[in-house]
Image: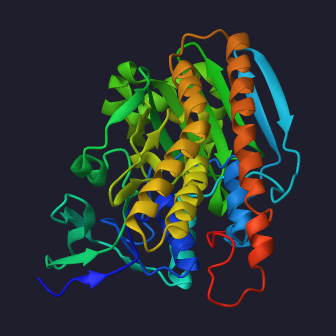
Amino acid sequence: MPPTDRYDAIVVGARVAGASTAMLLARSGLRVLVVDRDRYGSDTLSTHALMRGGVLQLSRWGLLDELVAAGTPPVHRTVLRYGTTEETVEVQPGPHVPALFAPRRTVLDRLLVDAAVRAGAEVRFRTCLTDLLRDDDGRVVGIEARGEDGERWTATAPVTIGADGIRSLVARQVGAGTYAAGVHASAMVVGHWSGVDVDGYHVRYGPGAAAGLIPTNDGRACCWVATPAAGFTDQRREPALGMTGVLGVLAPDWADALDAGVRHGPIRGFAGVPGYLRQPWGRGWALVGDAGFFKDPLTTHGMTDALRDAELLARAVVGAAGSARALDAALAGYHDTRDRFAGELLRLSDAIAAYDWEPGELRGMFLDVSAAVRPELTHLLGLDAPTEADVLTAGAGAGGRGRGGAA
């Protein structure tokens, strides 16, 4: 193999969690390597919806204008139908959050990767992780990888970050244990159409099923249908027929609109996985995004969680640069903070994914979800507030990294 390259951090995975973590680390002056097995700008299954915390993060990082410039339409209201009861919730503009947005992953993931590269991160696509490197004491010290040309090479860093999704190879290789898990799961099918008029987030819930219609880039609408994973057989065999069957019950008007529109690309399916919290750190490694925390997609909060946790992790790594002992302590703090926001969301998401609710009960569950994410927003807004240490070190010279450096 060629000589080993040395970095301050290595990130495995270049989607929402990995690209944003790499961007924040690179903005703080760290030398960062990102590897991803897919190609640049590739698509992936998603409901697209960003919640307030996700929009807040993109705005704080100076990327929201780019998202809007890419043709991502603003969403100013959410229309929810529980059985036969419909409720419209207007999106109230707030600090950094003029509206909600639902970008295609071909837009959002690329935007974050480009921002990471501008910050100085090195990104290698079509590159597969093959193994983790360890020192004589078992601490993770880097990766072995294989490029598109089949050549194997190694790179070392004080911390290797797994942002490689539900089936994270990093998590498997370090033996990251699951210590909290749900028992229910939603299967989903998702497609995109043009010629369908939709002016907000529209979601409908009925017996044993849910469906959403959401505006996204290029004047298209994303339609998704969710059912209990145990009943996914029909959708797996014929995703289009499975979607039509659910829409025929929950939203026949949507089915008519989709028939009159033009479908772009295939209807893709996700068989469903119960939510979990995995141990997100160890000696020389950490997990972010779905690699460490996944919850049922029916709450459409996954990308927002990834953008939040990317900053929590980046700040921990930057604040402990240069010391293995300090890094371990900082990653333990990241673990605690992540779980403070994740634990209740995991519980509520699993209850919603049971599909055994009555319409009025489900509305109460989503009110609980809204209450559970408020501390997250407060915390993220507080990251911009100067601390006593910032005041004492302001103007102390160019040698310091500044206020955590990650935002």
The answer to which of 190 and 54 lies nearer the viewer is 54
Name above or below for residue 147 compared with residue 366.
Answer: below
Residue 226 placed where, x, y %?
Answer: 51, 29
The answer to whether one can see residue 247 in this image is no
Position of 276 compared to 262: left or right?
left
The C terminus lies in quadrant: bottom right
Task: Please tell me whether residue 303 is drawn above or below residue 349 in the rendered image.
Answer: below
Percent of width and height locating residue 175: 25, 44
Residue 158's quadrant in the figure?
bottom left
Q: Residue 391 appears in which quarter of the rendering?
A: bottom right
Along the viewing direction, whichever of 226 and 337 lies nearer the viewer = 337
Q: Depth check: give the residue in front, 1 or 350.
A: 1
Instruction: Say above or below: 192 vs 326.
Output: above
Instruction: Give the image's coloring scheme.
Output: rainbow
Report the residue at 26% width, 62% height from top.
140
- Residue 322 location, x and y as percent? 44, 74
